[in-house]
């Protein structure tokens, strides 16, 4: 097993850089893992992100009418999943809010913009964003657009759910508690 882990680590270490070379910076593409052991009914998308300290990336997709599971996560530049135990760097369908128009809007930024659907880069100015739709009636590849953090409120629908720092802290505390309870399941 150690050889297999070593192979996988070397195999993916330049994955984010390859997406950049392919032109997938702040945009997403299909990630076809059908030959690599993907589950039936699972559809992945991915892209590299690059944002400055005063910028945010808004990732948007029309949510499938029927969907068993969906998620979005961030990684660093060597494709390690961003620490979601201490950071709000992943969301799934039970955690995110879908707007009235049926569109999921997720904001990627290096500091909390006070919106519910935020993904924390944990200080990484670049890395990868990856998502999946499982057992869904469609498999949209989201779009992404970069905005200044100062302009974020005007770039989102007026009824975008906002949260306070205390509410965010509670969300992260609850995430930690859930992770720590996993062995008990």
Image: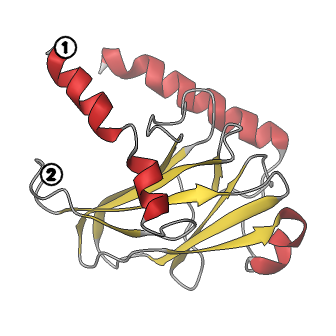
Outermost residue, bottom side? 101
Pointer 2 or 1: first along the chain = 1
The answer to which image quadrant residue 31 occupies is: bottom left
The answer to which image quadrant residue 8 occupies is: top left
Is any atom of residue 174 visible in this view? Answer: yes
Where's residue 60, x and y in %?
55, 74
For the residue pair 174 and 16, the one nearer the viewer reads as: 16
Q: Which residue lies under the disc numbered 2?
A: 38
Q: Residue at x 46, y 62 (%)?
A: 21
Q: Which residue lies under the disc numbered 1?
A: 2
Q: Residue at x 77, y 79 (%)?
A: 155
Drawn side of residue 88 relative to residue 94, left or right: right
For the residue pair 26 and 20, the one nearer the viewer reads as: 20
**Looking at the image, is mark 2 or mark 1 nearer the viewer?**
1
Where's residue 117, x and y in %?
63, 58
Q: Residue at x 77, y 71 (%)?
A: 147
């Amino acid at each position: 097993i150690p050889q297999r882990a070593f192979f996988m680590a070397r195999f993916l270490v330049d994955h984010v850089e390859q997406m950049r070379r392919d032109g997938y910076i702040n945009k997403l593409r299909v990630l076809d893992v059908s030959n690599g052991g993907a589950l039936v009914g699972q559809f992945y998308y991915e892209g590299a992100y690059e944002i400055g300290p005063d910028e945010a990336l808004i990732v948007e997709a029309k949510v499938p009418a029927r969907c068993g599971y969906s998620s979005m996560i961030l990684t660093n530049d060597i494709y390690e999943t961003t620490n979601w135990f201490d950071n709000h760097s992943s969301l799934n369908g039970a955690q995110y809010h879908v707007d009235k128009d049926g569109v999921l809007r997720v904001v990627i930024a290096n500091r909390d913009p006070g919106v519910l659907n935020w993904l924390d880069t944990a200080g990484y100015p670049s890395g990868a964003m990856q998502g999946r739709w499982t057992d869904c009636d469609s498999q949209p590849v989201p779009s992404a657009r970069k905005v200044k953090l100062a302009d974020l409120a005007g770039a989102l629908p007026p009824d975008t759910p906002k949260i306070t720092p205390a509410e965010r802290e509670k969300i992260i505390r609850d995430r930690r508690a859930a992770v720590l309870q996993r062995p008990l399941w």
